[in-house]
Amino acid sequence: MADDDTKDVVSITESLHIHGWAHLDALFLASLAMQAPTLLIGLHGTAKTFLVEQLASALHLAYRHYNASLLNYDDLVGIPMPDEKGEHLRFITTSGAIWQAEFAFFDEISRCRPDLQNKLFPIIHERRVIGMDLPCLQHRWAAMNPPAPDNPDADVAQTYLGSEALDAALIDRFAFIIPVPAWHDLSRKERLQVILGEGETMMPSALDFAALVARCQALIPTVEAAAREWIGDYLMYALDLLEKAKLPQSPRRARMLARNLIAVHAARIVLEGESVDMETSAEIALQYSIPQNATETSPTSTALITIHRQAWEIINHLSNSAWRQILEEPDVVRRALIGEELDVTEDEMARLITGVLAANLPQPRKVGLAVVMYMAFSTRRNLPALAWEPLIKLARPVLTPSTIQHGTLPQNELLLWNNEIRPWVCGIRDGADAITMLKINFILSGFPTLWRQHKWQEALGQFTQDLQDFQLVEL
């Protein structure tokens, strides 16, 4: 394996004949290098067990597979018997006992009895069982199906009624909590590789896994030293943003996140070369280190990436007090308002405006905000074209209303018009001021398209609030 940056990227999972998992390679190498407890979450038949078996084999470790849904404690430790003097216990065990295990895998852990989960806790967390050390044990991995929601959907094929959420304290002992790809996540090429059984001959991997793990372990102190100046600030902001998103983390998790980030970056250097960027490593580590990944309402990947990018942007603007204040605000609309209060530059305000329009907001809110920001900034700002163009595109239907052809509307939309919108318009139009006419135009321009999926009264209330927030009380 060459050391220069032009070398091919090494894929752990592809070398083990697992297709579509290459984006998780750095996580697996980081976990092995740290000997960190790791939890895999995925649908049945997604190769979770196969991955762990292959890793243990490639590392030439004594491997124990336990089906936690069927496991008895005696299967782990054996049957205790007093010695001849009656002073100590010895255990009558089988070859499957955990005492000599180097890699232990607890499959179906979400189907494990609560009392047995409590007994697995010290094995996963401390590498101890019944108060005794397990000096041989290096890796503790587990797997589970997604826990069943309280109100399962009709799609029973994707709902695991026997899979229960793990105790929060137990989840918090896993350093990495990794959702793995399902069939629909694979590309066409990857699906064909699975269908055609590429790799089923089970040829040994050409990679020296022990050497990869050793290289990653050796790099971790160097990466940690380089990251000390910024990693604390990044994680403090990221953890605050997670809490605001109702994803609070424990102090233990905060330290785990720091270790995971450092190990993931070291793993990416080993697998991809020296040119890998720390920002991507932080994004990967944050996405796959959150205990809520193992809950019934796991956060979306998009939500975690958004939190990461906001935290990363904040630490890159720590020297700019105005931008730090703006970026610490999670609401994109409030950011634009704060930017106006702080009198940021035209280019900076354009950036905030495009951020509002790119956010995951309901379409009526985007249209309303485009109108409000266009009218507010047209007299206050000389913004660049990159801000004006999207504002005008969204605001034009409201500012230049067209005629509605009632005769072509379906019955339900005619009822909406005749019973709700038309009476409201007629009731406020006579003698209306400019702001009221703007509100009428907003509702009329959205009919019928926007009001097929959104409630026009709620959208009107939000539009009214946005007008007030941007100080458009009169025109």
Image: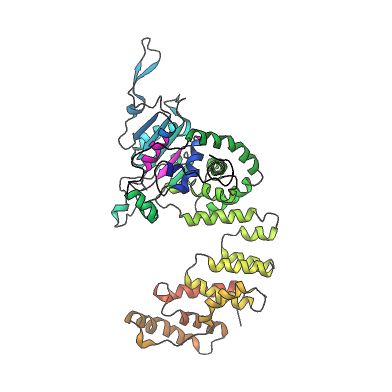
Is 70 in the magenta? no
- As drawn, the residue found furthest toward the bottom would be 430
Residue 44 on image: x %, y %: 33, 46
Residue 472 in sight here: no
Q: Is residue 403 above or below residue 36?
A: below
Q: Residue at x 38, y 9 (%)?
A: 85
**Residue 340, located in which quarter of the rendered image?**
bottom right
Residue 297 on image: x %, y %: 41, 53
Is 35 in the magenta? yes
**Residue 261, located in which quarter of the rendered image?**
top right
In the foreground, 435 or 101: 101
In the foreground, 200 or 83: 200
Q: Is residue 38 left or right of residue 7?
A: left
In the foreground, 18 or 452: 18
Residue 314 in sight here: yes
- As drawn, the residue found furthest toward the top would be 85
Q: Is residue 160 above or below residue 36?
A: below
Q: Is residue 63 above or below residue 445?
A: above
Instruction: Specify the color scheme.
Output: rainbow
The residue range painted magenta reads 34-55
Q: Is residue 68 left or right of residue 401?
A: left
Q: Residue at x 55, y 53 (%)?
A: 308
Q: Is residue 67 left or right of residue 460?
A: left
Residue 280 on image: x %, y %: 55, 51
Q: How many badges with numbers are in the image?
A: 0
In the foreground, 345 or 2: 2
